[in-house]
Amino acid sequence: MAEHVGTGAVLVVDFGAQYAQLIARRVREARSYSEIVSNDLTAAEFAALEPAAIILSGGPASVNIDGAPVIDPGVYDLGIPILGICYGAQLIAKQLGGTVSRFEAGEYGRTGLTVIDHGRLLVGQPAEQSVWMSHFDCISEIPQGFTATASTANAPVAAFESDHICGVQYHPEVSHTEHGQSVIERWLDDSGVDRTWTMANIIDEQVQLIRDQVGTGRAICGLSGGVDSAVAAALVHKAIGPQLTCVYVDTGLMRKNESEQVVETFRKTQGIELIHVRAADEFFEKLAGLTEPESKRKAIGETFIRVFEKAKGGIEDAGFLVQGTLYPDVIESGSKHGSTIKSHHNVGGLPDDMEFDLVEPLRALFKDEVRKVGAELGLPDEVVWRQPFPGPGLGVRIIGEVTPDKVAVLQDADFIVREVLRQAGLEREIFQSFAVLPDIRSVGVMGDERTYGYPIIVRAVTSEDVMTADWARIPYDVLETISSRVINEVGGVNRVAYDITSKPPGTIEWE
């Protein structure tokens, strides 16, 4: 959940599913700032946050079961514009005196919607349109003072509204709903929500926050080789200039030739003081014998911080650590109201006795927004469009114990995967592509001899924001080239497989 909600934000109330993240993104695409909050805030707490508007998200539960998530009914009396989506719409209806019941059948996927009263929300939209539904319960009776504005075959009330509260049974946030973004933008405009939020606004706001936090102190930033840390460093440098020193820690877990490239590129384009620390031996020592994913992540995270604490020697008043933590990192690492999907090394893996205060200027942004900030700051394409790379590096792409020999095998295989995709002109189309080394071996035949070698798993996905992803439809001839080159050029590998799992149910990384 969001930890620092700004006045004037659109608050998206999370009812326990991925819908909240997508809604928040769509609001931002409409140039209004949004943040996700828990449903257990009180009406007084909502009022204290001074939001411009509130959206109640969808969710997997039925509003009619015991223990279903609710919202403080006092929120409806605050006069703040409210939009309920799917579960959120049903909750509004139920809490304000309407009825939610089971109809003849549920609706899932594309569904025909009939507009019966354009009202305020559906102005200018066609009377018949296609929307995306995902419900079994439906609103059968609206609360007093509301007007039904649309229906479907199995949802007699698919949209309704009053003076400051609206609800839609369908999902306007998904691309399958024909006029979904128009619904969101119309609601924002009708609610008087400011729609001038841009990356330039974010930069100006963060620059001031960084200056307020750091003051006259000094900060160090860890460059990981990814776009997140590079953009975070550029943003902090814009705020405090020479008070920032960047430290690039060579963990031994980077991609092939990447350490040299990162140091050269950053020194050339940024003009920021950069310390290059070679610490591979320390990381391999801490990882020795570890096989459980969370243990490896936490070991890498703690070692990372300890190396930083050594690196700050000689840097006067280096009391602040800059990290490229993103919004999905915070969400996936869990909170009081959500389960942990995985601990990110820059969120859940930090030691309790860390000697730094954290500066995380990207903590409220999604990945595509970070790229826009980077471009706005003048970072070169080679940095802005670098594929995402996890902080723990190849340590989370080697299943089982991480050793120098395994890293060498994976580096060579991973280099081939990315090179072939780049040569095929697919680099910009694919959000993330890499190789995974599992902790198994398989039988093979090479040169009429039996082999017993590692398989390499190729992972390539398309995504906008990391929260969801689909496996990339790479042409068969490209996959064939990858397989042939990996098997022929990487010693100890005799098999290549392609991962065709989306997120959800899987994650992009294997660990």
Image (spheres, grey):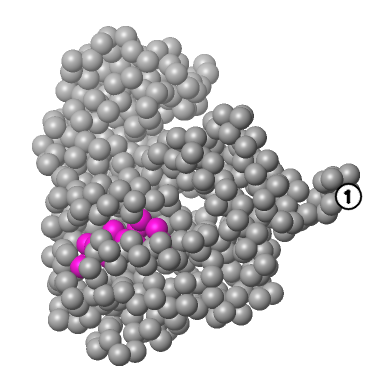
Quarter containing the N terminus: bottom left
Task: Report the residue that reaches farthest toward the right.
Answer: 449
Identify the residue at horizontal 78%, vertical 54% (top origin).
453
> Residue 135 placed where, x, y %?
47, 27
Quarter containing the C terminus: bottom right
Q: Which residue is mark 1?
A: 450
> Residue 252 placed where, x, y %?
54, 70
- Residue 143 placement, left or right of 86: left
- Residue 186 placement, left or right of 155: left
On screen, residue 217 above or below 467: below
Main SS class of the magenta portion in the image: helix
The image quadrant that residue 323 belongs to is bottom left
Q: Secondary structure at mark 1?
A: strand
- Residue 176 placement, left or right of 62: left
Q: Nearer the viewer, residue 235 or 267?
A: 267
- Residue 138 placement, left or right of 492: left
Report if residue 229 lies within the magenta region: yes
On screen, residue 496 above or below 323: above
Q: Residue 14, can we see it? A: yes
Q: Amino acid at mark 1?
A: Arg
Count all numbered tags in the image, as a single digit: 1
Q: Nearer the viewer, residue 445 or 328?
A: 445
Report if residue 335 lies within the magenta region: no
> Residue 56 placed where, x, y %?
32, 40
Residue stretch rendered in magenta on the structure: 225-237
Identify the residue at horizontal 27%, vertical 83% (top origin).
318
On screen, residue 458 above or below 214: above
Q: Residue 504, can we see it? A: no
Q: Nearer the viewer, residue 193 or 265?
A: 265
Identify the residue at horizontal 38%, vertical 20% (top origin).
131
Identify the residue at horizontal 14%, vertical 39% (top origin).
195
